[in-house]
Image (cartoon, rainbow, N blue to C red):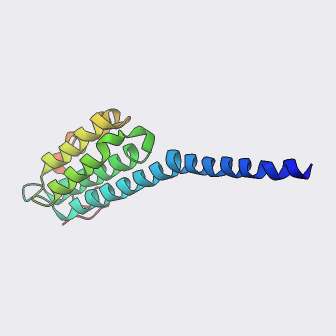
C-alpha cells in the first residue's frame, strides 16, 4: 500500500505543475498583458486633456476626451471583447499621434478604431460618439467633469 502511494506523488505533482502552466498561459498572462495595454491606452487618452487644439473650445475638448475615456472603459476593459492582434498596434499609433499636435480628427480616429476592433465599439460609437452629440458646438467647461487645458 505504501509503495503505491509513493508512486502517485510524482504523477500528482506533474499534473499540478502542468495545470499551473496552463492557468498561467491561458488566463493569468493574457489578462496581465491586456491590463498593461488597458492602462497604457487609458493614460494616453487622459493625457489628451492637456493637448487641446486651438480651434476647439475647452468645453468641446472636455466633452470629447471625457467620452473617449468612457469609450475605452466600456469597450476596452474586457480582454475577450478586444481583438488581440489590434491592441498593440493601436496603442503605438495612439502614442505616435499624441506626440504632436492633436485634433478632433484624432478623437474620431480613436472612435473609428474601437468601432472596428472591439465587440461593443460599433454600438457604443453609434450611441455616444461625442462629436456627433446634439449641442457639441455649444459645450461649456465643466460639462463632463474632467478638466482640460
- Of 62 and 124, nearer the camera is 124
Tell me residue 112's x, y (percent).
23, 38
- Of 53 and 132, nearer the camera is 53
What is the residue that sits farthest to the left in this orientation? 55
Name the image quarter holding residue 61. Answer: bottom left
Left or right for 77, reference 64: right
Tell me residue 122's x, y (percent).
31, 33
- Residue at 19 percent across and 43 percent down: it is 109
Tell me residue 138's x, y (percent).
17, 50
Left or right for 110, reference 55: right
Left or right for 102, reference 148: left
Q: Is residue 113 above or below residue 139?
A: above
- Residue at 25 percent across and 40 percent down: it is 113
- Of 137 and 29, nearer the camera is 29
- Residue at 21 percent across and 56 percent down: it is 95
What is the residue that sits farthest to the right in this orientation? 1
Name the image quarter holding residue 148. Answer: bottom left
Q: Is residue 75 above or below residue 54?
A: above
- Of 56 and 14, nearer the camera is 14
Locate the C terminus and report the quarter of the image it occupies.
Answer: bottom left
- Residue at 37 percent across and 40 percent down: it is 82
Tell me residue 14's x, y (percent).
66, 49
Q: How many marks?
A: 0
Amino acid at each position: 500500500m505504501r509503495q503505491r502511494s509513493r508512486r502517485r506523488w510524482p504523477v500528482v505533482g506533474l499534473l499540478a505543475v502542468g495545470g499551473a502552466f496552463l492557468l498561467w498561459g491561458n488566463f493569468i498572462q493574457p489578462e496581465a498583458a491586456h491590463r498593461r495595454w488597458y492602462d497604457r491606452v487609458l493614460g494616453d487618452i487622459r493625457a489628451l486633456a492637456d493637448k487641446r487644439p486651438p480651434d476647439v473650445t475647452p468645453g468641446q475638448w472636455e466633452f470629447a476626451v471625457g467620452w473617449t475615456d468612457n469609450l475605452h472603459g466600456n469597450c476596452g476593459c474586457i480582454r475577450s471583447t478586444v481583438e488581440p492582434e489590434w491592441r498593440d498596434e493601436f496603442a503605438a499609433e495612439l502614442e505616435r499621434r499624441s506626440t504632436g499636435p492633436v485634433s478632433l480628427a484624432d478623437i474620431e480616429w480613436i472612435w473609428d478604431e474601437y468601432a472596428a476592433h472591439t465587440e461593443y465599439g460599433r454600438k457604443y460609437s453609434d450611441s455616444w460618439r461625442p462629436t456627433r452629440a446634439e449641442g457639441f458646438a455649444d459645450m461649456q467647461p465643466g460639462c463632463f467633469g474632467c478638466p482640460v487645458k
